Amino acid sequence: MTPPDRHPDAPAVLAALDADASAAAGHQFVELAAAYLAAASAGEGAVAPALGPAELAARFREPLPRGGRPLAEVLDRLAGDVVGEANRLYHPMAMGHQVSPPLPVAIWAEMLVAALNQSVAVSEMSPSGTAVEGAVVHWMAELAGFGPRAGGTLTSGGTEATFAALLAARSRAIPDVWTDGVGAEPPVLVCGEHAHYAVSRAAGEMGIGLRNVVTVPSRDHRMDAEALERTLAELDASGRAVMAVVATAGSTATGAFDDLAAVADACGRRGHWLHVDGAHGASALLSAGHRGRLRGVERAHSLAWDPHKMLLLPLAAGVVLVREERWLEAAFAQKAPYLFHAPAQHEAEEFDAAPRVWDQGIRSFQCSRRFDALKVWVALQRHGADGLGALFDHLCATAARLHARLAAHPAFEPLHAPESNILCFRWTGARDDGADDAALDALQHALRARYNRSGAGWITATVLDGRRVLRVTVMNPRTGDAHLEALLAGLDAAGRAEWAARRAAGATSTPAGAAVAPDMP
Ligand SMILES: *Cc1c(COP(=O)(O)O)cnc(C)c1O
């Protein structure tokens, strides 16, 4: 049997394509998004849905839809089951993870990213896209002080950015790694105790192995520069080669910045590759008040920087930058003649004589890749670097005011002065009532769950110096003093309720030595 010339359903589907491409259809999505933004900004509704993962999964467990349905029905379903049961990051009481309530202009730009669907792996597939990404990378490298030969690419986030940067470091340390592998005794990776798991994950992914990750202890939640010096000297003495040293600019747990100038000194003396994980904190480069925290970053070989964090862009928008563009090409030393037609710079004898390859695919872990750079470009056009820097300062100032309130409150204990917009603290309202540290650990865990479940607000928790702590990330510029006040009142009430419940049940202490396992950030 030969297939029919035309599928009988095709005309109806084609008509739907035409109808859906109209501005009227698009407006319905815009209105849904704008209504969400307005309601959440005004603090309406719960910050997070009350339903748990199993209940939500059940709601979506249904047979594969074989036929289509009217757009209006799809929009109704979106409004109720998806928008209605999402975390409201635009709510001023949302102070949880490092995920942004995205800049409105970037939300609307997302629609263009999808409409144009330019794959920025290859210049011929993304004529204006490759140029825009090049401009964004150039501006960000300039902010980092990286000089004229710098390059980089957009990534899915900080994890991919750090992976790509460390692949570049690997190809420098083991020039034949692409064909021969890392060998039995690969060089070691050195990072701070507070480094994001992106670093150890990269070590596993690239065949270096966790055994070859050397951790430097912290002092005041940042890499202890003297301990780093000792560690590097010991590695020298034992003849171990070092692939890279990873410093953190804005740590996940506390938002603390490593002393990059001191780390760069230690690396510079030995010629080690310095990678800075600035996924969270590199956006301080746009801020007049906080730029100094990255002093020394211009001496790094590579930098990971997430615009989808403190530049308040929607996921995903990460960036990896290198001081020499060809280092990134060496990281992915693979030939794909069907895509890339010119020799890459790292293959040329004379770097300066080699024609620059525009195709970003030779510098990226990804092949097909979204035009995420457009969001960064639009945000910079709309607000300017100074406007985005002002937002950064505003968020950090809110965190500083929260710190002051916690310090003045008898039932709370702030655990560090915030260097950015992240702050860890403990509720200690039961201490005078006989709760020891272990009991307080259990209480932090329980009161956070109770508070988040209430829908009134949403915060995170982590483990700091072996103790369970509460953690707030101020990502929403709409969070003001009244919201900070409400946060403390809500957490204090949740703490008292949990303590009262424990006393009623006679469970006021925790067995000695009960281990506190770190959470995944
Ligand atoms: C968030 C974060 C990462 C991971 O970035 P993703 O964008 O989530 O992949 C890495 N390092 C630090 C310091 C971070 O804060």
Image: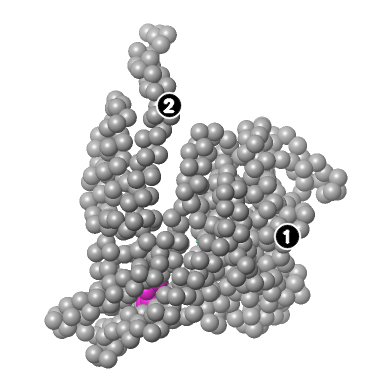
Q: In this view of the protein, can residue 425 be seen by the observer? A: yes
In the image: residue 42, left or right of residue 300? left
Q: Residue furthest left?
A: 504
Q: How many marks?
A: 2
Tell which of 498 and 47 is nearer to you. 47
Quadrant where the C terminus is found in the figure? bottom left
Image location (x, y in percent) of residue 234: 67, 80
Would residue 360 appear left or right of 108 to someone viewing this image?
Answer: right
- Disc 2 versus disc 1: distance between alpha carbons? 45 Å
Quick one: SS at disc 2? loop
Residue 270 percent location from the top left of the image = 75, 73
Amino acid carrying mark 2 in the image: Ser
- Mark 1 — residue? 146
Judging by the rendered image, the residue that carries numbered circle 2 is 22
Q: Residue 369 in magenta? A: no
Residue 350 location, x and y as percent? 86, 48
- Give left or right: position of 222 versus 27: right
Residue at x 45% of width, y 61% of height? 477
**Mark 2 / mark 1, whichever is N-terminal:** 2
Task: Please state, as top left, top right, bottom left or bottom right, where the N terminus lies in the image.
Answer: top left
Q: Quadrant of residue 215?
A: bottom right
Q: Residue 45 sits in which quadrant?
A: bottom left
Residue 326 lies, with reference to residue 262, above or below; the image says above
Which residue shows up at 75% across the image and 69% down it? 271
Residue occupying image coordinates x 32% and y 58%: 43
Instruction: Look at the image and give the residue range highlighted in magenta.
Output: 466-471
Q: Residue 29 sits in which quadrant?
A: top left
Q: Camera-side residue: 451 or 438?
A: 451
Task: Name above or below for residue 441 compared with residue 273.
Answer: below
| Crowd tier of the residue under label 2, counting other residues whose Cα lies within 10 Å: few below 14, some 14–19, many 20 or above | few
Q: Secondary structure at mark 1?
A: loop
